[in-house]
Every structure is written in structure tokens, then in C-alpha cells.
Image (cartoon, helix red, strand yellow):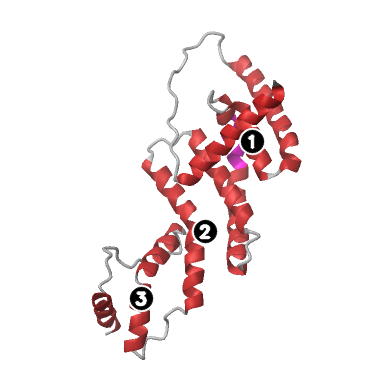
Amino acid sequence: MIIIKFAESVKQLDLKTSKKLKQDMPVKWNSTYLMLESAVLYSLAFCQLKLVDPNYKWCPSLEEWSRVEKIMRFLKPFHEMTELFSRHRYPTSNLYFRNVWRIQMLFQEQMVSMDLAISRMAKDMKSKFDKYWKCYSTVLTFAIVLDPRYKLEFIEFCYKKFDVSTSYEKVNVLREQMRELFEEYLRVIPPRCEQSSAIGTISGCDDDIDIMMDEFDSYRSQCADARS
């Protein structure tokens, strides 16, 4: 059987991995990344199987393995963010905003990829992503503005990174929405209320988050220099 021959190929090549091959699941897009990740670990075994079993005709070519690795690099941040949210029982809104913005930047970069397969995948995923993000982006943006560690300055930074030409207008719209929210708050909330001291902990996915925050620190310093 082909499974036995595959196991023999793994043993002959002495592949040092404890991970098992995973199957893709249509209802869980994150499973695609896990399937590709496990397949790459056994790529040599698949190639070996092709040599010893003439009936095995589905071994990816070198070009296809190269594309698999590109797709993995594209999907990895989405997998990491899924893992990040699943580890937090109560993910804070600022955790959502920062990582959703990171997804948007990733889409923007990959939609112009020279690899047409990656480009098409990014465009298709972004169209689906936008349907959900547009529904709650304003609320999550409010949370960042109200966070003393970020405030409106971080929103300006994010908008400029994404699209400088529309950033000024978006910030002004946000200011107006915040003003309307505050006025509504004054109408429905009593003048005196208890103050909450809880601040949600923000956790990043990987080094990309640290790089982003370094860029924000530089942006904040430049703004301070410009005002002085």
C-alpha cells in the first residue's frame, strides 16, 4: 500500500519530525496552512515515494513546492492571529484593532505580488474580509483612541501607513464620530460613576508587531519634533 511505502520513505530518509500529515478542511480555512506546513516537512519523503512507487503520480514538482512555501508565508500571519485570539478568553479591543490592521497591510502588499496565484488569493480573501471588518472597524478604532498608550496618534499612523491620500479625511471623520459618541454618553450616563482601572493586556503575534511598534515610536518622535 502507498501509505506503507510512504512510511518506509520517511524512515529511510530519517526525517526528524514528530508532526503528522494533516488534511485540509473546507469549513476551516486555517487548516489549509496546517496542511501545507506538515506537507513541506515531508517533501523529501513525497519525492522519494515517487521514485520507488510508479503508481504515485501526485508528487508536486519543484515549482509547486516553491509555490507551497510562498503560500505558507502568506497564510502564516493569519494562522498566528487565529492562535493568538484563541489563547485569550477575553481578547481586548485594542488587540483586535492592531492585528486586523496588520491583516489589511498584508493584503495590500500581497495583492500586487508578482505571483499571480498569491495575488488572486489575496484579492479573494480581502473581499471576504472587508464584509466583516467594515461592520465593526469604527468601534475598535474608538477603543484605541481611548487607550492612553495609543490615542488618536496611533490611528493617524495606521491610516497613513495604509493610504496617505485618505488618512486626513478618515481622522476627521473619526473625530466627529467620537464627538457624537461623547454627546450621547452625556445624555444617557449619570454625571457620577465608578471608574474602572482595568486595562487589557496587549499581546503580539510575532516580530512583525514589534517592528510595527518601533515604526510607531519613530512616527511619534517625528511628530513631536515637528511641533517643537
Query: Which is more toward the observer, 219 or 3?
Result: 219
Left or right placement of residue 200 versus residue 17 in this view: right
Residues at marks 1 and 3, CA–CA distance in whole angstroms: 45 Å
Residue 92: % across, % down? 46, 33
Residues at marks 3 and 2, CA–CA distance in whole angstroms: 22 Å
The residue singled out by tag 1 in the image is 157
Q: Is residue 136 magenta?
A: yes
**Which of the two discs, 1 and 3, labels the residue nearer the N terminus?**
3
Mark 3 residue type: Leu
Q: Residue 44 has which mark?
A: 3
Mark 2 residue type: Phe
Quadrant of the image containing the C terminus: top right
**Which of the two discs, 3 and 2, labels the residue nearer the N terminus?**
3
Q: Quadrant of residue 201?
A: top left
Q: Which residue is at a point 25% across and 73% down the rendered structure image? A: 14
Few, some or many residues within 10 Å of mark 2 (<14, 14–19, 20+): some
User: Is 89 above or below relative to 192?
Assistant: below
Residue 98: % across, % down? 53, 39
Query: Which is more toward the observer, 56 or 70?
Result: 70
Residue 20: % across, % down? 30, 66
User: Is 90 above or below relative to 176?
Assistant: below
Q: Which residues are magenta?
A: 135-142
Q: Is residue 102 magenta?
A: no
The residue singled out by tag 2 in the image is 74
Left or right placement of residue 19 versus residue 210 in this view: left
